[in-house]
Image: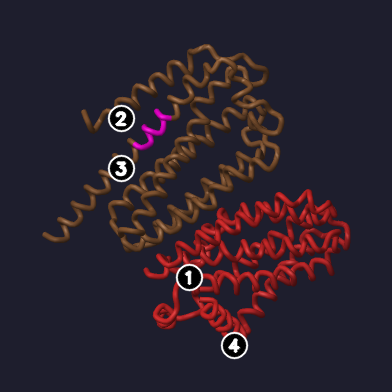
Amino acid sequence: MRQSWWKILAIALLLYTLIAGLLMEAPRLPILNETIRALHFHVTMWFGMILMLVVAVYYSIKYLRTNDIRNDDLAIEFTNSAILFGVLGIVTGMLWAKFTWGDYWSGDPKQNAAAIGILMYFAYLILRNSLTDSQQRARIGAIYNIFAFAAFIPLIFVLPRLTDSLHPGNGGNPGFNAYDLDSKLRAVFYPAIIGWTLLGSWIATVRVRMRRVERTIEDRMINS
Amino acid sequence: MWKEISVLISKEVTLEWRQKFALNGILLYVVSAVFITYLSVGAKQGNISSPTWNALYWIIILFSAVNAVAKSFVQEHQGRQLYYYMIASPEAIILSKIIYNTGLTLILALLGYGVFSVILGNPVQDQGLFILNLVLGAMGFSASLTMVSGIASKAGNNATLMAILSFPVIIPILLMAIRISKNAMDGLDWNVSMDKLITLLAINAIVAVTGYILFPYLWRS
């Protein structure tokens, strides 16, 4: 119970997100209409992705300092979960864009930046797979992970803000604060961020355990 | 530290001068690339619109820079790298390579600019801003590409890896540089571009500092 309270919390928060996010009263607004509910399923993906990337970078730094392969397991799996969230974020965003902007891809700066960010992390996976020695893979993977994150931050947070974006909250489009006068959306949005991030971490930790079990079995086979 | 760096830079220059084929090769690469674009777009002098000019110019510089910098960790043998490892600090090595590659990229960019002006026309109205932007762009390209070429050299150094690792990392720098150079072409006031110049400088600094911190770990492996 001590170990699994956060998994129960994740399930509870996600059930709440699904039920409240889909059924609750949402502000009626022109253009957005009911698609404003995408806030709980699309925007939260990016929050979850960034939080998990921060965790992955933390473990990459820790790996470089300690050379403990266990830190690398956490770094790669948190990145994997973050990539999953990123892809889901792009797909949900495209669906939403189809109904509000009229096209799946409108060349919006944030959309482009997100796609480039995903490319960066796909390159990270390919780099890792091109290295065969596990210690070297971990070390060079960690170095690129930190380096990519340093380039990812200006890409996501700085560049899109320098030009007009179609996203709510940019380029004269009213944002979250302007829509949400009675904070009804926030009551679902914040728990949704926590819920999705916990789910991502759960996926990551399960995969970390699988990785470690596989390694132990391999070692045993080699040593026996 | 600075003495070490200047010695390493002069070593890079000497090495480049001795193997002139590499330098000449990359210079020829720029000229041929510009010529291919010129023939492909079928533009007679001055007929090409300035955003297209800008985009073509920066794409050519990007590819030439990737090719020029990609060799920075391969042209020397493993044995000699071990020798450097013993006599120089990794910080000095990465800084000297970044500075040297900045110079190399800048030469490429200026050459490309010259050839572009001659055969495709020169729509740039504010030369000072354009050149300043080239310097900043060359710094950013070289800082990120040097680090990525170090990473790629550890991973068997194949060209695909170099490209896929560097392109996403370099896009923020490329986008800023393209925007500033558009402003320079339109001859806008420097105040308009000031915040973009500062952003570009900040991105360069982030990339260079990250490379500087991470390179010792890469060098040791």
A204 displayed left or right of A181 = left
Q: Chain of mark 4?
A: B
**Vertical relation: B102 (above or below) B200:** below
- Front disc: 2 or 4: 2
Output the letter for the chain in red.
B
Residue tagged by mark 4?
Answer: B18
Answer whether residue B142 is visible to the viewer in this image.
yes
- Counting residues from the N terminus, which is met first, the one under dot 4 or under dot 1? 4
Q: Amino acid at mark 1?
A: Glu
SS majority, magenta = helix
Q: Amino acid at mark 3?
A: Arg
Whole-angstrom CA distance, mark 2 to mark 1, is 43 Å
SS for callout 3: helix
Residue tagged by mark 1?
Answer: B91
Task: Tell me if label 3 and label 1 are in contact, CB under 8 Å.
Answer: no
Using the image as rendered, state which of residue B157 and residue B37 is in the foreground.
B157
Residue tagged by mark 2?
Answer: A6
Q: Amino acid at mark 2?
A: Trp
Please state, as top left, top right, bottom left or bottom right, where the N terminus of chain A lies in the image: top left
Q: Which residue appears at 37% of the width and 68% of the height?
A: B221
